[in-house]
Amino acid sequence: MTPIYQTSTYVQEGVGNHKGYAYSRTANPTRHALEESIAALENGEYGACFGSGLAAIDCLIKILNPGDEVITSADLYGGTYRIFTTIFAKYGIKFHFINVDEVQDIEKIINSNTKLVWLETPTNPMMNIVDIALIAQITKKAKIWLAVDNTFATPYLQTPLDLGADIIMHSVTKYLGGHSDVVMGALVTSNENIAKEIYRIQNSSGAVPGPMDCFLVLRGIKTLHLRMQRHCENGEKVAKWLKDHPKVDKTYWPGFESHPNHGIAKKQMRGFGGMIAFSLKGNNLKEAHDIMAKFKVFSLAESLGGVESLICHPVTMTHGAIPKSERDKAGIVDSLIRLSVGVEDIEDLIHDLKQALA
Ligand SMILES: Cc1ncc(COP(=O)(O)O)c(C=O)c1O
């Protein structure tokens, strides 16, 4: 097993002659093993791990300069929206938020300052799917970078570098870690120039994870395929059960043939995952809160992607940082409930949903 190199520094052979590792902010063998593992999973050349998913995003956007522009969608994890609008906008980087169904029209917004297109697919929490290969054609033609947040799909279901993306970002906290016991982020690329910048900023800004956490994620990754298979199986059964429930208005899951992007999902993903969102008929906030309080197997908590099923209310929890006007644009309504379907026995999960919605 990869040892946990619980050390900040390394004894050197002589002045100017270290054995490959000098100081653990710059590099640590346990972290290095994990960075190589995540890069390999994504079919990428270079991997870098960070203290959180947001620290990974922070590193990537720091490659840009004041005056540069980024195109992204409004249907985005709330923390990503917050770092874009309240941190980097302050340093002169401009963000264009477009509706997810207009992403194919980005050519109209690209100008000489545009440097990056940032995509989340499937999106959090609306489970929209964006055609990565189509957007990659546009970004390649315009000679700008395409970054994909692959947190929801994981490399088990989707490998965006193979579809033409330049950079992958992960909240490793979620499925890669898989056990809700680590906060971590990662970036992967096969572009040497981008990688050099990532490692320069990783070392200069210093948002690196510790070796114990890297060990836990290395262990988590060993069962990624088993967990994802079960997340997909349970996700499908839960989504189908919810769809027919009389209290449920809309169920968002890309595996439904009626999902507006089902065709793209089938083309670019190897399964549809265990993330589901649903809204209630009447769209009543209090009713959503009351129903959520009744769950016994699904735990009420932020985050996703662990073996345990979680339930969350995006408007008051994960997406509170997004203004209501932007939330409404993306369809994040008051009664929307998000499920991270875990790997438990499906009968227990369905029973829990049944009693909570009764
Ligand atoms: C899709 C997505 N991207 C990024 C993040 C941020 O990652 P972290 O919480 O590890 O900083 C999250 C966290 O929920 C997420 O769901």
Image (tube, rainbow, N blue to C red):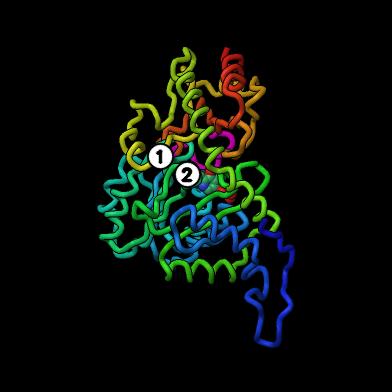
Element at badge 1? Answer: loop
Residue labelled with disc 2: 156
Crowding at label 2, few (<14), some or many (≥20) Cα neighbours within 10 Å? some
Q: Position of residue 67 (x, y in %)?
A: 40, 66
The residue at the point 25 percent across, 52 percent down is 108
Q: What stretch is highlighted in magenta?
A: 314-326
**In this picture, residue 16 sits left or right of residue 126:** right
Q: Would residue 21 be found to the left or right of residue 138 on screen? A: right
Is residue 224 covered in magenta? Answer: no
Q: Is 290 situated above or below 136?
A: above
Q: Distance between the residues labelled 1 and 2?
A: 7 Å
Q: Is residue 322 magenta?
A: yes
Residue 79 in sight: no
User: Residue 257, located in which quarter of the rendered image?
Assistant: top left
- The quarter of the displayed image where residue 165 is located: bottom left
The amino acid beneath tag 2 is Tyr
Q: Do the residues labelled 1 and 2 touch (CB within 8 Å)?
A: yes
The residue under label 1 is: 270
For the point 56% across and 52% down, which residue is it? 53
